[in-house]
């Protein structure tokens, strides 16, 4: 599901994403060559093969269905973000060429979504969490799980944006559908990645890519806290606005004239959505959640300011 | 296990394999995928022409039709499932109602078109890829603007992917014989541990391979022993040009 197949993207989106992915790949290849020297090709080759083999391991989910690892965050935690990007790109090229799993015209988009967001941004989240929380095996595992979950959801959102931009379906629907599918897939990805990284951090910590773990809380920590804090404040404000207009999605749907298609489709795919959050209780939960986000964000920002002051004083 | 099942039709003599090198075939596959995959919505006549070209392609590559259908069918769920959601999401006049769902005519049309485009693109790539050895295909990537690091790590990955798959199979068998009837949670934990060990082992193997390569004089490039085949440039240019022309005709058809 994470792959976009041939035929879904418009020419503009396909070419734009291909050019962007090509530029990122060229930059990344140079970075990894510098980081890994001539060790690069054997290391990355074996990692590519390992991701392929790992994707064949099925994890039973429920009722006969099973999922498998995508592996972006796991590879990035092991080999670093740039090498992780190249490994995932290699996997995607082979899948598009030999297994017709994800199309050649969508290769650029898939590389950006799965390798770019999955490995590089996923690693960024992991490294920030490690910097904040410290680098014990359990914390590393948890950080990797959270990073893998967020990266998977972001991958879905990016794919939704590309599909909406190609005018395959209205942007709101494609982003919503892809985000909710990946919010479920991300749970498995996060659990597997977290367990694997936890094991690796206990048994072979020397194999993990050296990140800022255990490094003194310098300016990095401050910047991360401030960034996370402002993100949380923004998210809180957005969810406050959204919860004060609970039917905004439907109103937009009516305005755009696809009320029937939109709402009924949504009701059919997510029947529990309405039963789960009926009227007042839903609003209450949303309100409490957004308030929590707002306050924790504000607290993080104050903490960042405090750190800045104490750093200046000392 | 091995790539043998992928290369089963690679050595068949056919017009396509006689007149083109693997690199040229890769170019043709890419051109065909782009012509089909990026056909603008509504260009039905151009799609029909492309369908004809794909049929000619099957004949030129002498690929058994059953094999092509089986291989395309394996990729079918990847584009069929998302396309099934389209009739119910694209706004337009109602065409039919299935229970609580209403399908719009525009949505049905778009879904049919996407499935057709995707099928054509996948079939074209499958035809060309099936008659080319996987190893040749990966070394053909060097001719394209693919970074050397990616193509050489792909070549090495290809060489070792089934070694690692077998290793993983052994570990999984050992796991199964020791775990018995474990609960799902324990099974997940055990399998994740197996995956972690897979990466540990692949890293160890990579280090060994690198040492062995260095002792044999590895200098950052993987030479190939494949004999150079002469391809017919004129035919390749003609085929790629034809595909581009069909795509352009599709664009004009939509604009007119």
Image: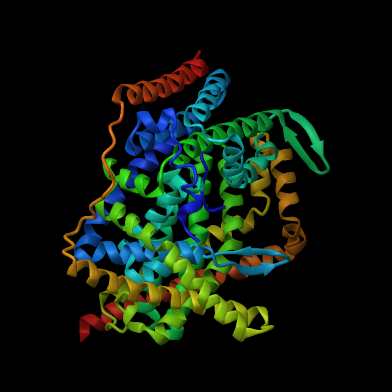
Query: Does residue B46 sit above or below B2 in this rendering?
Result: above
What residue is drawn where x is 28% and y is 55%?
B152
Q: Position of residue A263 (x, y in %)?
A: 72, 45
Q: Position of residue A307 (x, y in %)?
A: 31, 80
Towards the viewer: A261 or A96: A96
How many numbered marks appear?
Answer: 0
Left or right of B38? Residue A314 is left
Towards the viewer: A12 or A99: A99
Query: Does residue B69 sit above or below A294 in this rendering?
Result: above
What's the image's color scheme?
rainbow
Towards the viewer: A148 or B30: B30
Residue B73, quarter of the rendered image = top right
Q: Position of residue B15 (x, y in %)?
A: 42, 27
What residue is drawn where x is 28% and y is 77%?
A308
Left or right of A133? Residue A295 is right
Is residue A42 visible in this depiction of the protein? yes
Left or right of B37? Residue A224 is left
Towards the viewer: A277 or B75: B75
What residue is drawn where x is 57% and y is 60%?
A239
Is residue A233 visible in this depiction of the protein? no
Q: Position of residue A115 (x, y in %)?
A: 40, 56
């Amino acid at each position: 599901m994470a792959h976009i197949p041939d035929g879904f993207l418009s020419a503009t989106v396909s070419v734009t994403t291909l050019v962007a992915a090509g530029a990122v790949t060229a930059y990344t290849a140079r970075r990894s060559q510098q980081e890994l020297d001539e060790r690069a090709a054997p290391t990355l080759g074996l990692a590519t093969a390992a991701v392929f083999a790992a994707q064949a391991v099925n994890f039973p989910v429920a009722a006969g269905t099973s999922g498998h690892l995508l592996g972006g965050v796991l590879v990035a935690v092991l080999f670093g973000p740039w090498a992780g990007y190249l490994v995932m790109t290699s996997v995607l090229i082979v899948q598009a060429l030999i297994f017709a799993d994800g199309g050649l015209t969508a290769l650029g988009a898939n590389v950006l979504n799965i390798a770019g967001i999955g490995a590089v941004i996923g690693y960024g989240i992991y490294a920030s969490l490690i910097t904040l929380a410290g680098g014990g095996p359990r914390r590393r595992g948890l950080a990797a799980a959270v990073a893998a979950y967020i990266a998977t959801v972001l991958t879905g959102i990016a794919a939704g944006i590309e599909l909406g931009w190609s005018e395959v379906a209205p942007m709101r629907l494609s982003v919503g559908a892809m985000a909710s599918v990946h919010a479920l897939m991300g749970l498995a990805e996060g659990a597997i990645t977290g367990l694997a990284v936890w094991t690796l951090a206990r048994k072979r910590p020397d194999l993990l890519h050296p990140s800022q773990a255990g490094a003194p809380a310098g300016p990095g920590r401050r910047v991360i806290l401030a960034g996370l804090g402002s993100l949380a404040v923004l998210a809180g404000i957005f969810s406050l606005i959204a919860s004060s207009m609970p039917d905004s999605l439907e109103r937009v749907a009516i305005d755009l004239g696809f009320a029937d298609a939109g709402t009924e489709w949504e009701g059919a795919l997510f029947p529990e959505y309405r039963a789960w959050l009926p009227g007042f209780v839903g609003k209450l939960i949303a309100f409490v959640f957004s308030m929590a986000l707002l306050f924790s964000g504000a607290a993080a920002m104050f903490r960042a300011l405090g750190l800045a002051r104490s750093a200046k004083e000392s | 296990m091995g790539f043998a099942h992928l290369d089963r039709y690679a050595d068949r003599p056919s017009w396509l394999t006689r007149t083109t090198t693997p690199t040229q075939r890769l170019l043709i596959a890419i051109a065909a995928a782009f012509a089909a995959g990026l056909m603008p919505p509504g260009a039905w006549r151009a799609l029909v022409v492309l369908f004809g070209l794909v049929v000619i392609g099957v004949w030129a590559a002498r690929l058994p039709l059953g094999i092509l259908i089986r291989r395309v069918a394996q990729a079918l769920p990847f584009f069929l499932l998302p396309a099934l959601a389209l009739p119910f999401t694209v706004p337009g006049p109602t065409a039919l109602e299935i229970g609580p769902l209403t399908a719009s005519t525009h949505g049905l049309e778009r879904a049919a078109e996407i499935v057709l485009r995707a099928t054509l693109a996948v079939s074209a790539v499958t035809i060309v890829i099936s008659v080319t050895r996987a190893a040749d295909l990966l070394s053909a990537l060097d001719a394209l603007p693919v970074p050397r690091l990616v193509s050489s790590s792909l070549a090495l990955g290809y060489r070792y992917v089934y070694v690692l798959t077998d290793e993983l199979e052994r570990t999984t068998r050992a796991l199964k014989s020791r775990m018995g009837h474990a609960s799902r949670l324990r099974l997940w934990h055990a399998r994740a541990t197996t995956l972690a060990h897979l990466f540990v082992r692949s890293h160890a193997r990579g280090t060994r391979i690198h040492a062995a390569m260095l002792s044999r004089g590895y200098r950052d490039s993987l030479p190939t022993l494949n004999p150079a085949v002469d391809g017919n440039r004129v035919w390749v240019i003609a085929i790629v040009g034809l595909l581009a022309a069909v795509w352009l005709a599709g664009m004009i058809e939509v604009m007119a």
